[in-house]
Image (tube, grey):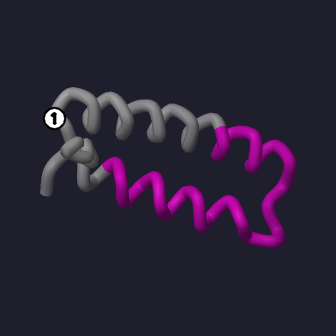
């Protein structure tokens, strides 16, 4: 599986995981920090490989 797909899976899993009701504030802070890093990494790969770019007519 490509690095991009792996990061997208991790990003979506973190987005879902952060919503759990029993998370502590410390856990949420750490997880949101990781989510932010993964999101930047995904966006970097999207830019690098032209993923998600829409063609303009």
Other-residue count near label 1 (Cα within 10 Å), few / some / many at <14 / 14–19 / ≥20? few
- Residue 24, quarter of the rendered image: bottom right
Q: Position of residue 18 (x, y in %)?
A: 68, 59
**Is 19 rendered above or below residue 35?**
below
Is residue 13 in the magenta section? yes
Secondary element under disc 1, as helix, strand or loop, is helix
Q: Residue furthest front?
A: 57
**Is 21 rendered above or below residue 45?**
below
Query: Residue, x 47% and y 61% (percent of image)?
Result: 12
Q: Is residue 15 left or right of residue 6?
A: right
- Residue 53, quarter of the rendered image: top left
Query: Residue, x 64% and y 46% (percent of image)?
Result: 31
Q: Residue furthest bottom?
A: 21
Query: Residue, x 34% and y 48% (percent of image)?
Result: 7
Decide which of 24, 32 is in the foreground and name it.
Answer: 32
Q: Which residues are magenta?
A: 7-32
- Residue 5, quarter of the rendered image: bottom left
């Amino acid at each position: 599986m490509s690095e991009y797909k792996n990061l997208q899976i991790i990003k979506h899993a973190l987005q879902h995981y952060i919503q759990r009701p029993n998370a502590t504030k410390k856990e949420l802070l750490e997880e949101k920090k990781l989510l932010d890093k993964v999101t930047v990494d995904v966006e970097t790969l999207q830019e690098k490989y032209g993923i998600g770019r829409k063609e303009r007519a």
